[in-house]
């Protein structure tokens, strides 16, 4: 119980952190204003596709956890590996988006207010994905080493809380930065 | 109380001299009465309880273990809440009187721009530009616009009313209706760097005739009263030693805006944004070694020779 | 509490804190025992208290006379910035967390915190954050834009030295440490209470720690966000707060943290006062429910008042009016507790120990500080007095007279438990009077200076009527406080070495920590009775007059 509560509290404080970053993005967009057209350079389709990978990874983690609870260690390892892979795919997609913005559109953190806000929010999210992947990799290694064979640990569930959180944050970020502006709900 | 001519002034919110400052002063007095009553109550209760219920020597009494009382709680919450309700009502009323909403496109009477560490003063209706000493007419409802060229500063004239921050990228406004002619003193009220302490300012409030006269005098381009060779030398040095890169003297090639406008410098009473009385001796010290006078200000040390500084001071002393 | 935690524990019992640490330094710095970590938190606070105090005295020397040249403006600006930053983040925070971490398991009948290693992590992050901040002095200059570090003054073009970068990194580290400890405290309080202790029966100190920990979790993120942004602006040329961005964004983020922060600093002291008033009056708290509920009200409201630090930025009637109302509202749960504590003393048998003296003095000092706070919620008054010495007076009355007096009260109250020795009460009373007189002399007069127009954060001031005299009085009194501080060092040292041996329960207390040994063994408790009320020890001592809840 303690582990899960601890993770929920950490998720809570991190959620507040992302809330502040997203609110700063919105504030800058309204109060100072982004250059028209810069936000249009974001590729909803491409990033949307890679976002699907991240969203699916929550599903695959859920599957992994179910297999752990029913004692099926082979599938646990399999679905956990898929989760990690999907996370890496997402990061790859993020990297592609960054490369496009930096090299083709020349939108950097230093020459654009939109760039400042965009790279900060998505960058911190990406950092949390990396941290999540490290956690999952360590978890996978320990499972392979047999540390979880007794089957009654709360650690996998706890790691799952963090991984789902990273997913939910991306849902919020994607909505605010990619979708709402296209619907003209954000300048 | 006629304070014109006083070089250094004690500014205090206890001497309101504008409509706005009077509103605030009344509210402040009311608050102080209520606050002192509340403090008095707490002190009296504390002392009384400590004296009456102190443990006496040899006493072994176990006091009654009173749990609490919802009625008392209600009273303890209710009375302060009522007091606060009253003060909230007075707060809103006074806010409306002091800082009414102003349309951003109404032309202000004066635009103040904060710099590190001086005040740029511009009168849009006549195009007059000066620094650090603001002249205003009494008895008129004035609108002042507040801007900043660098960091956040804050305008504060305690006898004239509320503070207003000068924020880069944002235009703020205050209204002012000064009651009597005098020289009022104020100071920057938001930490703005090394010399925040000496970013003081003066408002000279005068009747409309004197005010119009002052505006007219300041609208003129530069004119020097004495035309001797030392003046010409000083003028030449000013133009060639890059002084004009930072300072403006209207009617010459010097058009900089990094430092205060100097066109009518010697019409002002103090220098360095209120730090020192304005006279030739102080001006000499300043130009000679700025960092020894106001360390942290952005005036460079030009390492001039004695003659050069003398010529400059002689020239500038005539900038009226 | 059926899960075993398999932490390897030292085999020999834990001796008390002593000057001759026969335990060895290595054992201390590698410890995960909550009692040792609590003590180390307090030692960190103490170290920075001495440094922050010296900084304050340097400031007061410079301000003792008008147009003084003791310190240049550049040096003064670093000193006042470091003084504020140190006292808040590296004195009050670790003091508060130290008491929390030491006492929480003892007061809920637990043997350890939920995550002992995380506990150590929190401590050392705080300490390293402080070291990093102070490293700035030898790395090009300390931060010099004030403890709240407004933009755009904090940007690279206005503050070239890396002081502000060290400020950001140091506070980031210590913020992470605080969050870790807060998580630990919440999980401990939720799951490690002894059988029978329901949440409604938590001792008020533990209750305050619980609420406070949630406050920390919610308040530190805005600070971290702001610190990340200023680092990005300064190091990667981002545009959060520069031209093109928004200078006000910094203020919003900072005060969203900054206002809850002051409640983070005061709530545990409220908890300490609640314990102290009960024990030294021989009564139970008047209105437990209200006192507990008020802390929740404060925690929630704390996030709705931040713009009262920004009344002069020109936000307009509606916004200023809203925050005026919310700030007045939060004054009610904060201030009415004074009457609860007075009512607790009423009808009791009051013992004027040093701990109790600080608590009683707090009642008056905090009322003064609270009333000047209400003055600031009245927007037009704020428009005259914000950014003057009236604010300096206000903040010191609430932070010293409120928060720090609580630490001192707690120190004299729990020292016997922590060390097994009594502090000298007579010397303590000298300390009390010296400190209180010095404190009031230093800060009360600053209210008047603010009303007379003296702005804050100035390295010097003109020779206006009364400015010199009042500043001089303030400076002399500050040195009296300094002498009192030295006296405290001597009292504590003397107590550690020669203090009279204390029993388990020297004050005739009510709560579980007084059932452990003084100092407690490594394993706090071997066994405890089932808890049935808020004052388990009172119930044991007065079976015929047990508490009913």
Image (cartoon, coloured by chain):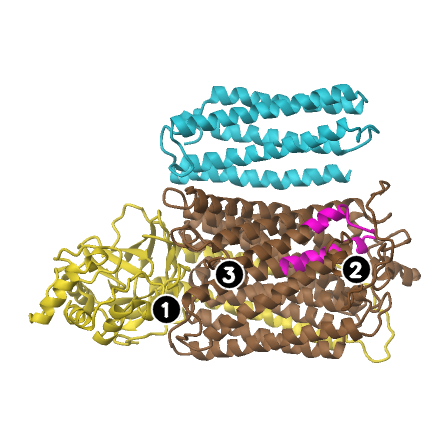
Q: Is residue B226 visible?
A: no
Alpha carbon separation for disc pair 2 and 1: 50 Å
* Rendered location of residue A87, percent (x, y): 60, 25
What residue is rendered at 56% in x and 52% in y? C171
Q: Is residue C369 left or right of residue B171?
A: right
Label 3 secondary element: helix
What residue is rendered at 73% in x and 72% in y? C493
Q: Colour of chain B?
A: yellow
Quarter holding the N terminus of chain C?
top right
Q: Colour of chain A?
A: cyan
Q: Which mark is residue B16?
A: 1
What residue is rendered at 70% in x and 21% in y? A79
Confirm whether circles 2 and 3 share one chain: no
Q: Is residue C107 magenta?
A: yes
Provide the residue designation for mark 2: B67
Magenta extent: C92-121
User: Pointer 2 indicates a residue of which chain?
Assistant: B
Provide the residue designation for mark 3: C137
Q: Is residue C451 visible?
A: yes
* Rendered location of residue B58, percent (x, y): 86, 79
Q: C426 or B159: which is nearer to us? A: C426
């Amino acid at each position: 119980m303690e582990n899960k509560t601890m993770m929920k509290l950490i998720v809570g404080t991190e959620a507040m952190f992302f809330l502040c970053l997203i609110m700063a993005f919105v504030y800058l967009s309204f109060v100072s204003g982004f250059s028209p057209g810069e936000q249009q350079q974001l590729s909803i389709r491409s990033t949307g596709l890679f976002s699907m990978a991240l969203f699916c990874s929550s599903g695959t983690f859920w599957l992994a956890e179910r297999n752990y609870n029913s004692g099926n260690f082979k599938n646990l390892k399999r679905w956990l590996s898929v989760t990690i892979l999907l996370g890496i795919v997402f990061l790859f997609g993020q990297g592609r988006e960054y490369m496009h913005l930096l090299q083709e559109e020349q939108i950097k953190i230093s020459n654009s207010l939109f760039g400042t806000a965009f790279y900060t929010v998505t960058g911190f999210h990406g950092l949390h994905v990396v941290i999540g992947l490290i956690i999952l990799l360590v978890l996978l290694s320990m499972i392979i080493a047999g540390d979880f064979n007794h089957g009654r640990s709360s650690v996998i569930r706890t790691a799952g809380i963090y991984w789902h959180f990273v997913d939910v944050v991306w849902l919020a970020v994607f909505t605010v930065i990619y979708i709402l502006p296209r619907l003209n709900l954000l300048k | 109380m006629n304070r014109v001519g006083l070089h250094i002034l004690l500014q205090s919110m206890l001497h309101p001299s504008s409509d706005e400052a009077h509103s605030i002063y009344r509210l402040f007095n009311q608050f102080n009465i209520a606050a002192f009553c509340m403090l008095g109550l707490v002190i009296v209760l504390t002392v009384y309880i400590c004296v009456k219920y102190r443990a006496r020597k040899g006493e072994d009494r176990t006091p009654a273990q009173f749990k609490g009382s919802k009625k008392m709680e209600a009273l303890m919450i209710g009375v302060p809440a009522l007091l606060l309700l009253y003060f909230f009502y007075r707060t809103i009323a006074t806010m409306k009187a002091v800082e009414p909403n102003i349309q951003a496109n109404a032309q202000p009477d004066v635009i103040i721009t904060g710099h590190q560490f001086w005040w740029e003063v511009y009168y849009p209706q006549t195009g007059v530009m000066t620094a650090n000493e603001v002249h205003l007419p009494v008895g008129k409802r004035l609108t002042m616009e507040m801007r900043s060229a660098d960091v956040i500063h804050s305008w504060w004239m305690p006898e004239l009313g509320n503070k207003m921050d000068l924020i880069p990228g944002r235009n703020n406004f205050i209204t002012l209706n000064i009651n009597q002619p005098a020289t009022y003193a104020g100071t920057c009220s938001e930490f703005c760097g090394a010399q925040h302490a000496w970013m003081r300012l003066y408002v000279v409030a005068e009747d409309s005739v004197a005010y119009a006269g002052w505006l007219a005098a300041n609208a003129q381009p530069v004119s020097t009263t004495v035309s001797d060779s030392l003046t010409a030398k000083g003028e030449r040095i000013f133009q060639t030693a890059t002084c004009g890169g930072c300072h403006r003297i209207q009617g010459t090639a010097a058009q900089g805006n990094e430092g205060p406008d100097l066109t009518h410098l010697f019409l002002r009473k103090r220098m360095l944004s209120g730090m020192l009385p304005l006279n030739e001796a102080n001006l000499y010290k300043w130009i000679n070694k700025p960092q020894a006078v106001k360390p942290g200000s952005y005036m460079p040390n030009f390492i001039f020779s004695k003659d050069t500084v003398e010529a400059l001071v002689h020239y500038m002393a005539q900038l009226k | 509490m059926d899960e075993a935690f398999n932490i390897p524990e030292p085999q020999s019992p834990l001796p008390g804190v002593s000057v001759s640490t026969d335990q060895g330094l290595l054992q201390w710095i590698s410890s995960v025992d909550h009692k040792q970590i609590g003590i180390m938190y307090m030692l960190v606070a103490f170290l920075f208290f001495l440094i922050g105090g010296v900084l304050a005295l340097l400031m007061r020397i410079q301000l003792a006379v008008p147009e003084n040249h003791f310190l240049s403006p550049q040096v003064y600006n670093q000193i006042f910035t470091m003084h504020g930053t140190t006292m808040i983040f590296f004195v009050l925070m670790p003091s508060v967390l130290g008491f929390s971490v030491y006492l929480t398991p003892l007061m809920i009948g637990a043997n350890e915190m939920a995550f002992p290693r995380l506990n150590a992590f929190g401590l050392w992050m705080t300490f390293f954050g402080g070291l990093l901040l102070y490293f700035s002095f030898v790395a090009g200059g300390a931060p010099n834009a004030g403890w709240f570090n407004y933009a755009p003054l904090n940007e690279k073009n206005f503050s070239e030295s890396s002081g502000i970068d060290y400020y950001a990194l140091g506070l980031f580290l210590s913020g992470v440490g605080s969050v870790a400890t807060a998580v630990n405290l919440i999980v401990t309080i939720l799951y490690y209470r002894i059988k029978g202790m329901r949440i409604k029966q938590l001792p008020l100190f533990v209750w305050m720690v619980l609420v406070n920990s949630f406050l920390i979790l919610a308040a530190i993120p805005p600070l971290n966000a702001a610190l990340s942004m200023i680092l990005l602006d300064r190091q990667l040329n981002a545009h959060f707060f520069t031209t093109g961005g928004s200078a006000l964004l910094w203020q919003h983020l900072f005060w969203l943290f900054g206002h809850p922060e002051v409640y983070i600093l005061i709530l545990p002291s409220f908890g300490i006062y609640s314990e102290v008033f009960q024990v030294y009056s021989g009564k139970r708290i008047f209105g437990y429910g209200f006192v507990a509920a008020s802390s929740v009200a404060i925690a929630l409201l704390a996030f709705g008042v931040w713009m009262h630090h920004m009344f002069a930025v020109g936000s307009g009637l509606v916004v200023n009016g809203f925050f005026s109302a919310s700030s007045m509202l939060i004054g009610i749960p904060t201030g009415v507790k004074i009457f609860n504590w007075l009512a607790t003393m009423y009808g009791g048998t009051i013992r004027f120990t040093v701990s109790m003296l600080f608590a009683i003095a707090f009642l008056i000092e905090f009322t003064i500080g609270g009333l000047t706070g209400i003055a600031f919620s009245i927007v037009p008054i704020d428009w005259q007095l914000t950014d003057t010495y009236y604010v300096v007076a206000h903040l010191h009355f609430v932070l010293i007279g409120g928060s720090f007096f609580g630490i001192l009260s707690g120190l004299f109250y729990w020292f016997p438990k922590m060390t097994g020795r009594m502090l000298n009460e007579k010397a303590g009373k000298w300390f009390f009077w010296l400190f209180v007189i010095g404190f009031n002399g230093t800060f009360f007069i600053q209210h008047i200076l603010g009303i007379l127009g003296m702005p804050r954060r100035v390295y010097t001031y003109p020779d206006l009527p009364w400015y010199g005299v009042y500043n001089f009085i303030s400076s002399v009194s500050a040195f009296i406080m300094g002498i009192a501080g030295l006296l405290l060092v001597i009292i504590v040292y003397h107590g550690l070495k020669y203090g009279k041996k204390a029993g388990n329960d020297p004050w005739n207390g009510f709560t579980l920590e007084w059932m452990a040994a003084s100092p407690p063994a490594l394993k706090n408790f071997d066994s405890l009775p089932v808890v049935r009320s808020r004052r388990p020890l009172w119930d044991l001592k007065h079976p015929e007059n047990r508490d009913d809840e």
